[in-house]
Amino acid sequence: MEEAVKLLKDILEIPSVNGRDDEGAVAEYLSEYFRKHQIQSKVRRIDETHANVTAFLPGKDRSRTEVWNGHIDTVPYGDLEKWHTDPAVPVEREGRIYARGASDMKSGAAAMVYALTHLPDLPAHNIFFAGTCDEEKKGLGAAELLKEEDLPDYDFLLIGEPTDLRLGVAHKGCLWLKITLKGKTGHGAYPEKGVNAIHYTYRLGEALIRYVYGFRHPLLGTSTAQIDQIRGGVAPNMTADSCEAVLDIRMTPGLTTEMILEKAREILEELRKEAPELSAEFEKLNDRRAFSIPETEPHVRRLRELLQEAGCPATDIGINFFTDASVLAALDLEKQVLLFGPGDPVMAHQPDEYVELEKYLQAVELLKKLAVSKTE
């Protein structure tokens, strides 16, 4: 399995920090790797620093297609003094490979690519691999992929995000909701003559947060929300007549953006009973829906069997962060999404990020077997 390890190290050595590096360099490398193994592959340039890589493997049963996805960008290195190795250079030590992206998620992407290029037989169904850029920010790569004519119709989406070889059967959605609230200015000595937009923005936000926390999931816990940005007012002695705030809302399955916006408008109308001059605009800065997949779904059942056969715990987990699934499958609730990868989610975005080599190699073997398994 030296070649599998080399593939991982090679793409870890290609810098792809989102917003700084050319993520397309990783796409070019992976495309060439596919072609070297006689697999059809393309690189789609979006701009100077963003590109996707795709590959297509025809299956024995060509009536069905599944999509395997991994993102090729990473977050910045952070405080270099907190690293014990150079995050730009993969270092193998005591059964681990340390580097930025080792866990999130170049190990997941590399495991998919190596597995697909070293299958013992044709895959049971068509497999479309998509290595997407810009996942760590706006999902530009996934959004661009939806525009491409060669993205096939599919019913199952496998995402190689870090799950520590557990079955990621649910993950939260994310809504960044910007609230722009207008009130009425006045002299600070006479607050009753004005309508304080900051005050009412806070009240609206707090009421919305309480609503969000009322939704739970057995693996994901509660939905969450917090006000992460706020600004308003003109001077210390003037009633603030405007305020802008941004809420970071993480939604469990069952809670949708539409439900949140409807509740926000209801809360606003309640506040307008006290202050009829109030008005507000709601803007979605980021909108990623939540997902869950039933334990009876055939890929879930088969991967659980493979994990048990390999002596690995076949544990279900929920993922709190969003993924490209919330773009790729945003418009079709029938598409089934499963997260599975060798990285540890706890190590994502952390100093001294690493992946355990044993789990990376186990992921390769499990993915090979999954690819050739006929699922009904």
Image (spheres, grey):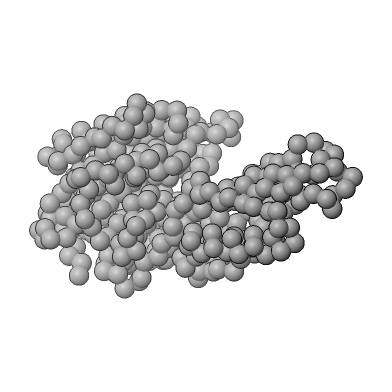
Dividing the picture into quarters, in which one does residue 188 lie?
top right
- Nearest to the observer: residue 126 or residue 343: 126
Q: Is residue 117 visible?
A: yes
Looking at the rendered image, the quarter that the C terminus falls into is: bottom left
Relative to 48, is 373 on the left or the right?
left
Looking at the rendered image, the quarter that the N terminus falls into is: top left
Q: Is residue 109 visible?
A: no
User: Which residue is at a point 74% across and 47% down the rendered structure image?
Assistant: 184
User: Which residue is at a point 38% across and 40% down the rendered structure image?
Assistant: 140
Return the x and y of residue 26 as percentages of the image width and height.
31, 33
Relative to 272, is 302 on the left or the right?
left
Question: Is residue 286 shown above or below 88?
Answer: below
- Nearest to the observer: residue 6 or residue 182: 182
Return the x and y of residue 262 as percentages of the image width and height.
54, 63
Q: How many marks?
A: 0
User: Which residue is at a point 34% across and 45% down the rendered structure image?
Assistant: 142
Question: Is residue 373 shown above or below 350?
Answer: below
User: Which residue is at a point 51% across and 33% down the rendered structure image?
Assistant: 77
Return the x and y of residue 368 as percentages of the image width and height.
22, 54
Question: Is residue 56 shown above or below 170?
Answer: above
Relative to 307, is 80 on the left or the right?
right
- Nearest to the observer: residue 177 or residue 250: 177
Outermost residue on the bottom side: it is 296
Relative to 26, is 266 on the left or the right?
right
Outermost residue on the right side: it is 189
